[in-house]
Image (cartoon, rainbow, N blue to C red):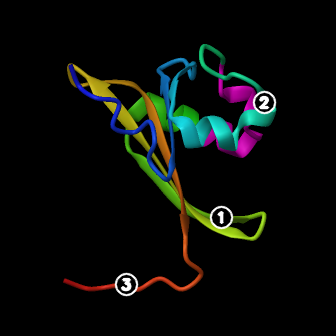
Amino acid sequence: MIPDWAKEMNCAVTVCDKEGIVLYMNDKAKETFARHGDLIGKSLIPCHNERSRGIIADLLAGGGSNAYTIEKNGLRKMIYQTAWRENGEVAGLVEISMVIPEEMPHYVR
């Protein structure tokens, strides 16, 4: 059995299926979205604006990834969204959200 390695990570991990139904949220994701109640088994589509819904639809239709940074409540965050696959077909999305420092080193290797 694979351990729930994401459960107590210090970043929010949310997984949805091809229809946008939330399948999994780790502890940090549950804490982050607590004001919305328990989202497991519910659609994440209503939680997003029209622009974001379009990005989600594109990712679910063709796969790929979307990455960006935000600032919310005085914290900078990196958001990384990517399709997950089953037997080569897009099966849903994973979103990882992590707090990042205001100044972050960048290395070229």
Which label's residue is closer to the chain start, 2 or 1?
A: 2
Q: Which residue is mark 1?
A: 70
Name which residue lies at 70% across and 45% down: 51
Q: Is disc 3 surrounded by few (<14), some (14 to 19) or many (20+) residues within 10 Å? A: few
Q: Which amino acid, mark 1?
A: Ile
Give the residue pinned by disc 3.
Answer: 106
Mark 3 → mark 2, Cα distance in angstroms: 35 Å
Coordinates of residue 77 in the picture (x, y in percent):
59, 63
**Residue type pointed to by label 2:** His
Q: CA distance from mark 1 to mark 3?
A: 18 Å
Pointer 2: what residue? 36
Q: Does residue 66 sit above or below 46 in this rendering?
A: below
Q: Is residue 77 magenta?
A: no
Q: Looking at the rendering, which quadrant does residue 84 occupy?
A: top left
Vertical placement of residue 108 versus 97, above or below: below
Magenta segment's dominant SS is helix
Asked if the residue under mark 3 is in contact with the one under mark 1, i.e. CB atoms within 8 Å, the reply is no
Check the picture and name the quadrant holding the C terminus: bottom left
Cα–Cα span, label 2 and label 1 = 20 Å
Check if residue 46 falls in the magenta segment.
yes
- The crowd level at tag 2 (other Cα within 10 Å; few <14, some 14-19, many 20+) is few
Check disc 3 and report its element: helix, strand or loop.
loop
What are the residue bounds of the magenta stretch? 43-55
Amino acid type at image mark 3? His
Q: Position of residue 45 (x, y in %)?
A: 68, 28
Of residues 27 and 24, the one drawn nearer to the viewer in this rendering: 27
